[in-house]
Image: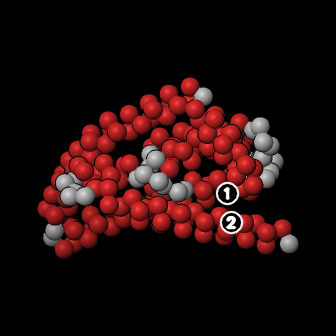
Amino acid sequence: MVNIIWASLIFIAIIYSLITGNISTINNGILTHAKSGFNLILEMLPLIVLWTGIMKIAETSGLLEKFSKLLNPILSKLFPSIRKDHKALGYIASNIAANMLGLGSAATPFGLKAMEELQKDNPKKDTASDAMITFLVLNTAGVTLIPTTVIALRIMHGSLNPTEIIITSILATTISSISGLLLDHHIRKRAKK
């Protein structure tokens, strides 16, 4: 669906530029922004590779499993339908750890594995389970202690104080996480009545 929306917006922009005679603006925009997008990828790639590697080392060394056990009391309250020894809880904890460090790219593989494990226990394969929805809310609004990726972007673009966003980031993500989880709990409670 999103692909259709983006394709439609691009098509409308091209038609509008043809009608108004501004086709050179579209051409310049495509060439300029394609180059800046490619440069951004090249600048961010080392950071993503580094943190993905660190997360892989943490996973292999058992550090993520220890973190998972530390989070287990909280996760068992958030995900009451999941067994305490379920493999998905380890992936969820790993995803939370990566998100807390502001490493959305490194968190994605753990999130996908968690959803895959949750889907195995899902009785309705075409509908998300309560645990899947709660995980999605938690993943989307997750608390970020150190927004590493954003700090790196700010450094790359010449920010005078790239770390000044840490406090506001913690506040914003904490509020969004609590709000999202409360709303998820409220909706689930209402649906059971």
Within-10-Å neighbours for mark 2: few <14, some 14–19, many 20+: some
Q: Position of residue 118 (x, y in %)?
A: 71, 44
Q: Earlier in the sequence, mark 1 or mark 2?
A: 1
Residue at image position (31%, 42%) is 44
Q: Position of residue 36 (x, y in %)?
A: 22, 50
Q: Residue most toward the top?
A: 61
**Residue 47 circle label:** none
Q: How is the image coloured?
A: secondary structure
Residue at image position (53%, 31%) is 58
Q: CA distance from mark 1 to mark 2?
A: 7 Å
The residue to which callout 2 is attached is 184
Give yes or no for contact between labels 1 and 2 (Cβ–Cβ under 8 Å).
yes
Residue in front for this viewpoint, 139 or 22: 139
Kind of residue sitting beneath label 2: Asp
Q: Is residue 82 above or below residue 18?
A: above
Quadrant position of the C terminus in the picture: bottom right
Q: Is residue 77 above or below residue 178?
A: above
Q: Is residue 140 above or below residue 54?
A: below
Relative horizontal placement of residue 20, taking residue 117 as reference (left or right): left
Within-10-Å neighbours for mark 1: few <14, some 14–19, many 20+: many
Residue at image position (26%, 71%) is 16
Q: Residue most toward the right?
A: 193
Residue at image position (67%, 68%) is 182
Q: Would residue 127 be visible to someone looking at this image?
A: no
Label 2: which secondary element? helix
Q: Would residue 166 be visible to someone looking at this image?
A: yes
Kind of residue sitting beneath label 1: Thr
**Residue 134 circle label:** 1
